[in-house]
Each structure stands twice: as structure tokens, then as C-alpha cells.
Amino acid sequence: MSKRDGVGTVLGGRKKRPARRPRPASGGSGASGSRAPRFAKPLTTASVLGWTALSALVPGAAHLRAGHRRTGMILISVYAVALLGALAFALTREDLVASLTSFAGDGMQITVIVVASAFALGWFALMVTSYVALGPNRLNQQGQVVTGIIVGVLCVAVMSPFALAAGYVQTLRNAIGDIFPSSPDSDGPPIAKNPDNPWGSRTRVNFLLVGGDAAGNRTGVRTDSMNVASVDLKTGNTVLFSLPRNLQHVRFPPSSPLARQFPNGFMAELPNGGLLNEVWQYANDHPEIMGGKNKGPRALMDAVGYTLDLKIDYYALINMYGFAALVDAIGGLKIRVEQDVRWGGLYGTAGTIKAGYRKLTGEQALWYGRSRVNSDDFSRMGRQRCVIGAFAQQATPAVILTNFNKIAGAAKRMAQTNIPQQLVQPLAEVAVKVKDAKITSLQFVPPAFWPGSADWVKIRQATKKAINASMRPPKQAQTAGVSASPSVTGPTPAKTRAAGPTQTPTRNSQKADAESVDELCGL
């Protein structure tokens, strides 16, 4: 071969080298797997932030953009499966709100806290790895600083919902621990060991709801409001029985120590004494008679249960000033006020709640149920049951979740009960049923019932009749003189007054039959 030929061959080879440029695409696939795709545009500060933020909503998006296809597809697949599982759970629940009551159990609460914490850490790691995968080190110094700060803020933002959920559940656990005793009351009913049926053979549960007026200028607790909620465990249908605070000379069951102390009725020797609202404090002041300290709740439960011929299972004492804070926590109560209600002192100098459909603050709702200015005990009892009915209707799950921390804080300051923690979840399930069930009310006030000379047989008969009526279908209940819940169609005498302000029940309007709280109070 000549020298010229050799030179020509070399030059010819150099001229042909551009034709060999596609070779890395076909033969260098192993090297290209570690680099960004050749068709991808260079990442800017905005695109790094955009793809990182997108990864918070679609995990794996940033990894796909960075060329890590396998990692990206795995993340997206896991995320899609999780979403489909959550959707399937929601769609297969017949009553989603009822299913959420499982979160009232302590075991479920701990699970939620652990899972929420794990998700918070997982999403934080996802944001960091997505940011690193995009190669922010290829940005200029200013871009690296800006993206680092903003991605840090994004990491905090994506962790916040999980931290908030864990915080809500922990607040719930603390509130339950502060309000409900950890072990059952020795005087209370036994708890069934079967977790699927915690109520045992009981078909109804009776709760004594007490409004306590423990003011700073008064010794002890004065139980000014006493209501019994008798709840059907299957349907949630509830009857509210309101007893006047000045009901005199109540009797006690033979098993009560006070039955031996007062065989003819509570302080029967006092013609103007022996009021029902004195029983609680009397029992607390005389532990030598009751056989122990703090037996006021037991004594009042015995007296009320014997009066109505019901077994009172549990009680809840509500501090009235704490109740005002609870009303404020849910944003107030909407109540139809039949006539102006003045409150404060003997002459109502503190304020006036005007007639009409009003949204009451906590203080206004408290005094709407307490004021006796130009009124009497029986009228305010009617207003009190309207407050209870309004709260039960308007404290919806959405309202509770929105104001959860405020509600939990107010509840811890206002409540005392003997309901054990083991029954909190079953009680939540019952509460969901009650919310959509029929609620009727019966007050033992004049002219049908006179507190100074009570007809105990008549009271028991009326109680039994009201409970039996609440268990009938709506049409049968209307025939018996009991109005059904708001879903009932067809004209009734109470419905004809629904267009105007609903009359606040007074002692001249009481009947011996139970009536619908919704219709009486214009809820």
C-alpha cells in the first residue's frame, strides 16, 4: 500500500466518522440508563419545583421525569392501588357515618395515630427523593437555594394533614380519658364481655341528663335540670322525660339507703321542702347514710328511676356554664323563640332574647333555658328541652369535625359521667341512630302533673305509654297522639303552626302524652 493510499484511507476514515454518531443510541444503552433522556429539555428552577410539587399529588411523577422509569411506575402503581382500596371501602359502606364510629375505640385511635405518623414520614421522604431525583445540583446557585427553601416548605405542607389527623385523634383520646372513667362504676350495670354486643340483653338504655348549677357563690351542686333519655338500641327512637326540680317527696327503691331514711318520701316532714334538686347534694353531704362518699349521682338515679319505673343505667352531669362554651364551640344554636325572653337578675336587666328564629350564642342559649323572668319553672323546662333538641340536631358530624378541638376542650370542662370508656364506641353508634330517629318528649308539669302532690301511679303510666308509643311505626304513633319525626308527611295539628314561631311550651299547654320535640320547638 502506498503512502498516499494510507493517507487517503485515514482521511477517508475521518470523513466517515459522523456517520457513526447514532451508535451510542443502539450500542450504549447501558450508559444512557444513568442519564436523563436525550429528548428531555434541561430542567429549570420552575420545572424542578413543578415536578416536585406534582409528586405530592401523584407519587412517582418526578422520578419518571428524571428517567427513573421503574421507580416511578412502582410508586404510581402503589398509589393507584391505595386510592382504589379507599374508594372501594367508601362505596361498600352502607352508612359511612356509622362506620366512622369505629374510630371512637381506643385500639382504632392508636392505629390511626401510628398510621398517620407513618404516612407523614413517608410523604416527607417522597418529597425529598423526588427533589433529589430531578438533580437540583445542575441548577445555578440561586436556583438551588430557591428550590431548597420552597421544597422544604412543601415537605412541611404535605406532612400537615397527617399531623393534624394524628393531633385530632390524640385530642379525642385525651378528652375520652378525662370525661369517661376507665373502669365501670361499682353501682352501674355490668358490661357484656361480648364486644359485638356490649349492651347484653338490654333493648333500651336510660340516661339521666343533669344540668348542674355549681356557681362560685354556692356550695355543692344544684341539679336544676333533670331529663331522662330513654333510647331504643335497635331503632334509636328516644323519649325525653323532663322532671321539675321542685318535684316534692320522691320515693326511693327498697335497695336504696335513703328508702330506710325516708320511708314516706324525701323529707316528707317538710311541707315546702324535699325537692328533687336537693337529693344529689343531700347524699353527698351524708356519706354515713349512703355508705360512701360522692353517692349523689346514685341517689338521684335511684329517685328518678323509681319515680318513672325505669332502670337508670347511666348519668351525665353537664355544668351549665360549660354547656355555654360547648354551644359557642359549634358556632351557636338556631332556635325559634316564641316570645321575648329577658334574663339576668329578678327583672331581666342583663339582656333580652328577641322573639323570632334566632341563632343564639352560648350565653344566650344558657339563659334561654334558665331564665324565669316573667316565667316559671315549667316554661323554662319546655325551653330546656328545645335547647337539647336543637343541639342534638345541629351538632352534625361536619360541624363536630370542623370545630373538634374547641368541642373537646369545652367537653372536658363541662361533663361528669359514669359511662365507662369501654362503651364510648357503642355509645357513638347509638348516637348516630338517635340523630335520624324519632325523638318525643314528655314533661311532668301542671296541669297534668302537680309537683307538690305528685300522683306516682299516673307518672309511671304516662312513662310506659310514651315508651310504647315511641316503638310504634309513625302512623300508629300519630293515632296514639304522639307526633313523629320531621320526615312524617300528612297534616297534624302541630304542623299547622309550623309556619309561624313555634310556641314555647308552657304549663297551660302541657299534655299527658309525649310530643315531637321538632314540632314543639320549630326545629
Image (spheres, rainbow, N blue to C red):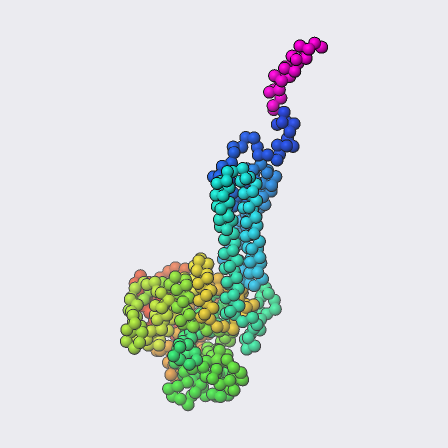
Question: Residue 133: horizontal and vertical position, in percent?
Answer: 57, 41
Q: Dividing the image into 4 quarters, which one contains the N terminus?
A: top right
Residue at point 41% right, 69% down?
323
The chief SS type of the magenta part is helix
- Please determine whether, in this image, residue 281 is positioned above or below residue 169: below
Question: Residue 470: horizontal and vertical position, in percent?
Answer: 45, 68
Q: Is residue 214 magenta?
A: no
| Chain part drawn in magenta | 1-22
Residue at point 28% right, 76% down?
347
Q: Dividing the image into 4 quarters, which one contains the C terminus?
A: bottom left
In depth, the one of 38 and 88 nearer the eye is 38
Residue 522 in view of the camera: no
User: Residue 22 sits in which quadrant?
Assistant: top right
Residue at point 47% right, 68% down?
412
Residue 181 in view of the camera: yes
In the image: residue 314, left or right of residue 495: right
Residue at point 45% right, 84% down?
282
